[in-house]
Image (tube, rainbow, N blue to C red):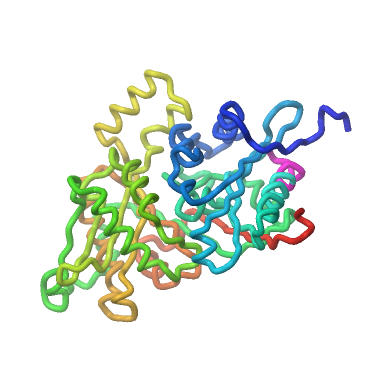
Amino acid sequence: MNEADQLVIIPVSGFRQMTTFIQLPRLLYAGLPGYVAPLDMVQRDLLLPTRNPFFRRGQAQYFLAMRNGQAVGRISAQIDPVAIAHIGEKVGFFGALDAVDDLNVVSALIDAAAMWLRERGMKVMRGPQTPNSNGEFGMMIEGQHELPMVAMPWHPHWLPGMMAACGMVGQEDLLAYRIFTGPDAEEAHLVPSSLRMGEGRLGSITTRGLDMSRLHEEGETLRQLYNDAWRNNWGSLPLTRDEMNGMISELRPLLRPEHYVLIEQDSQPVAFALVVPNVYDISADLGGAPSPMGWLKLGKRLLRHEFHSARVILLGVSSRLEGTALGAIMPALAISELMKRGRSLPYRTVELGWVLESNLPIRRLIERIAPQPYKRYRVYDRALTDDDL
């Protein structure tokens, strides 16, 4: 092999290489059916240590695969002290995996991430997640031709097929469901007509929307409920205050009171649901780096709320109601309330995800409306051994 054709994996350093790292997926995947470039601005919020609150506690290293002076792949490796404490094991993460259709490139990238994590004492590498499961989580297995969704990753069909050869073992599948809004979906939800908030068995139950004048206070209530509701869910990590504040600041221009359902029992929060509009609806035709005219179009679309799809990103029930009849009905009530409020919004579809394939109670509830998932993602592990050094 000519020396110029040799594959080299380099740690990212400096502004120019970081820019290449951020822009690489849209350069590699341009023209592939189903691929839509995310905004570089959104990716910078996700990846840059100066922008993502994750880096106030965690650390990461980014790598580029170079061949003939051209970038042909990328990967990240992350260590999250909150995750290690929560999981109770020295698990490090890999993420931001994107590459050309070449097993040598993908294998070299995964080996580089594994070595970096092993050198820092990690025993298992899990991913992809960027930077953890509160960011972009899982590798897309099915659904590449479907509408892209906010905060969900996209991967070409060849990457999953390479994972086994790279020592990766699938651990869990994550599912996403699509609900078409309207009367049919509301009727299919099958919430008993005898159950009405504030009446009968639900006499102590009330609900409200988002208080836009107190967004960060609302975020703290949501954070505490989420951490309580999903404390034992595989793959879920507790949201920190920094992460929630960052999420609220990022979502502020998109949010409306109807996007949030908080259910209270005797004035105490017991269940919640948060839906966010899909930014791809207004950015897909503008590319990752819009022109000045493109930014003007984006701003106008945002002000007019020209979205036609959305995603339920957070949904949960307080552990106080765990194992009770009231707790069992709460997710249905939350989703039903979101759908009712959605009558005043322009969304034609709403995505529910991600949902663990093993979470049968939630799946059964959702599948009353959407019988089959329309996207599937997978999370992999690789044991880190001395061979990774």
Q: Residue at x 12, y 74 (%)?
A: 203
- Drawn side of residue 29 relative to residue 72, left or right: left
Q: Quadrant of the N terminus?
A: top right
- Drawn side of residue 221 relative to residue 229, left or right: left
Q: Is residue 284 magenta?
A: no
Q: Position of residue 362 (x, y in %)?
A: 39, 68
Count up the numbered dots. 0
Q: Is residue 196 visible?
A: no
In the figure, residue 121 lies in which quadrant? bottom right
Q: Is residue 307 above or below residue 187?
A: above
Q: Position of residue 211 (x, y in %)?
A: 18, 50
Q: Position of residue 334 (x, y in %)?
A: 26, 63
Magenta span: chief secondary structure: helix
54 or 208, which lies in front?
A: 54
243 or 354, which lies in front?
A: 243
- Drawn side of residue 88 relative to residue 334, left or right: right
Q: Residue at x 29, y 35 (%)?
A: 306
Q: Tell me which segment is drawn in magenta.
A: 100-107
- Single out the residue that lies furthest toward the bottom: 324
